[in-house]
Amino acid sequence: MANTKKNNDNIQPYIKVGKEKINTTEEQARAHMRSRWAEHKRREREQKCLDAKGRQCTADCSTCDKDKQSRFISLDAQREAGIDFADPFNMDDFVANQILLQELAKALDELDPQNRKIAELAGLGFSEREISTEVGLSQKGVNKRKVKIFDQLREKLKHYR
């Protein structure tokens, strides 16, 4: 969730990941929220039914008895209607990914706090310059540490790929 917090009388945008707040630029916060806003608008549109000419109805939906023709039909409803789809879900891949994520979490826990912060911010797409201001190192220092950290993580996780 993108929010802002006051920092020396300036508003500092941040993204909330779990319980941690990660400072971002306003552009990054907007990019993070853009997909949420688009999904919210799509859901609003699908709640409206269509009139006889195929345009969105402007009447109050709570009192409308028309079928909501523009709504998406769930896969379950389609299966109940006799339409069958191939299931794209692969349990083996799912389990392998879960194991890999657990091992990655363990490997990240083994890092010292500064290296863990560098890895997490890099994983979120922050630039080395932004990470350097966050952790108090030079950009080149962040680059060297990041290369070593990711090499260590690759080495620890090579058996799970």
Image: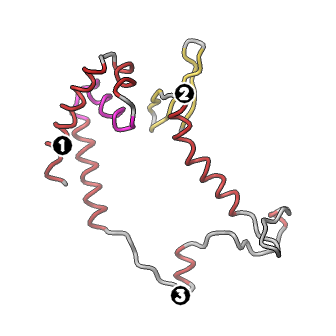
| Residue type (three-letter) at the residue carrying disc 3 | Gly
152 vs 10: above or below:
below
Q: Which residues are magenta?
A: 109-125
- Residue occupied by mark 1: 154
Residue 152: x and y, percent?
16, 36
Q: CA distance from mark 2 to mark 3?
A: 49 Å
* Residue 113 rendering spot, x and y as whole percentages: 28, 25
Local crowd size for mark 1, using a 10 Å CA cut-off: few (<14), some (14–19), many (≥20): some
In the displayed structure image, the side of residue 119 where residue 5 appears, left or right: right
Of 6 and 55, nearer the camera is: 55
In the image, is residue 127 above or below residue 86?
above
Mark 2 vs 3: CB contact within 8 A: no
Q: Quadrant of the C terminus?
A: bottom left
Q: How many marks?
A: 3
Residue picked out by circle 2: 13
- Identify the amino acid type marked 1: Arg
Q: Nearer the viewer, mark 3 or mark 1?
A: 1
